[in-house]
Amino acid sequence: MTTTTTTQTLVHHETALALLGVTRTHGTGDASVTALRDVTLELPTGSWTAIMGPSGSGKSTLLQIAAGLDHVDSGRVVLGGTDITDATDHERTLLRRNRIGFVFQAFNLIASLTAEQNVALPLELAGRHPSRQMIRDALSRVGLGDRVGHRPRELSGGQQQRVAIARAMITAPEVLFADEPTGALDSTAARVVLAMMREMTDAGQTILMVTHDPAAAAAADSTVFLRDGQLVDALTGADAATIANRLVSLETGR
Ligand code: ADP
Ligand code: MG
């Protein structure tokens, strides 16, 4: 069995997440679509990586697989030294609760709960009982220390996304997965959320983010580009204009 050996050889100690030769096909027969084709991607601990690509290029599939929400047809997925490729459903549930965090475009807060209760939820689900102070500290860190009792509808979009970030971070996840985290925000609120994500990576957090916004991608350390399920390019430290140009050329096939 060579797979394990290969994994151990390729994944470095400082790698928070690795996809190694991942292929994923949705559907069967004539209707089948290969959403990812031999994708290899390593995220160093403390790095922030953006994923861009035309619609249908495989971004969501990549994020789902990296987060252990979907399985691969071939290749390996390694989270912080644990090979999760063949994890059972139960193991995946534990993974989601304890080792990874999510932030979505639509915030996904529970409307009937206060900011404080929303943030406490992942810990409650994991059977832990956070102190009030711990929850308030988490909200203070995203600048919402004075909004703990507010419900989502009483908060702006940017504030709701900051609650979602506090909720994602409360379990100190190894990797934060963000799917269009600024997609529903105006540019000012987006900048605040991106600044918060930078603070997290400065503190050693690892982030993988799907975005359509070149400005958001420019806030990350590097951007990888998908086309037809393949990683076709990567830019490190590029500005928004450079990233936008690369994306346009991918979309127009030039
Ligand atoms: P993106 O997020 O970049 O738009 P996706 O990962 O959602 O791309 O999809 C990649 C390809 O896989 C697309 O052609 C899409 O139609 C197909 N696909 C995604 N999910 C499924 C599914 N559950 N069943 C069938 N095809 C799917
Ligand atoms: Mg998608």
Image (cartoon, grey):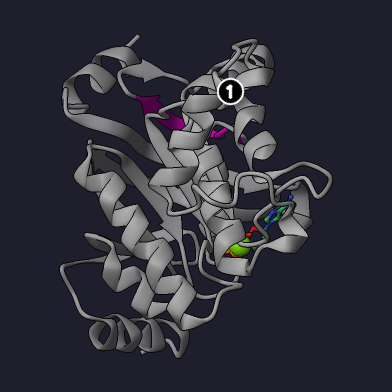
Instruction: Specify the segment rendered in magenta.
Output: 70-79
The CB of the residue at mark 1 lies under 8 Å from ligand 1 = no
The residue positioned 43% from the left and 45% from the top of the image is 140
Q: Is residue 97 left or right of residue 222?
A: right
What is the total number of numbered labels drawn onto the structure image? 1
Residue 72 position within the rendered picture, expressed as x and y whole percent measured from the top left: 55, 34
Residue occupied by mark 1: 97
Q: Main secondary structure of the magenta part?
A: strand
| Residue 69 screen position, x and y as percent | 61, 34
Could you tell me which residue is drawn at 54 percent across and 43 percent down?
102
Left or right of 174, for residue 11: left
- Quadrant where the N terminus sits is top left
Who's the residue at 23% across and 85% down the image? 242
Ligand 1, by image quadrant, is bottom right
Amino acid beneath label 1:
Arg
Please say whether residue 244 is visible from this viewpoint. Answer: yes
**Viewed as shown, does residue 191 lie left or right of 151?**
left
Q: Which corner quadrant holds the C terminus?
A: bottom left
Q: Position of residue 87 (x, y in %)?
A: 56, 16
Q: Residue at x 76, y 49 (%)?
A: 29
Q: Nearer the viewer, residue 103 or 252?
A: 103
Front-lying residue, 148 or 65: 148
In the rendered image, the vertical position of residue 32 relative to residue 129, given as above or below: below
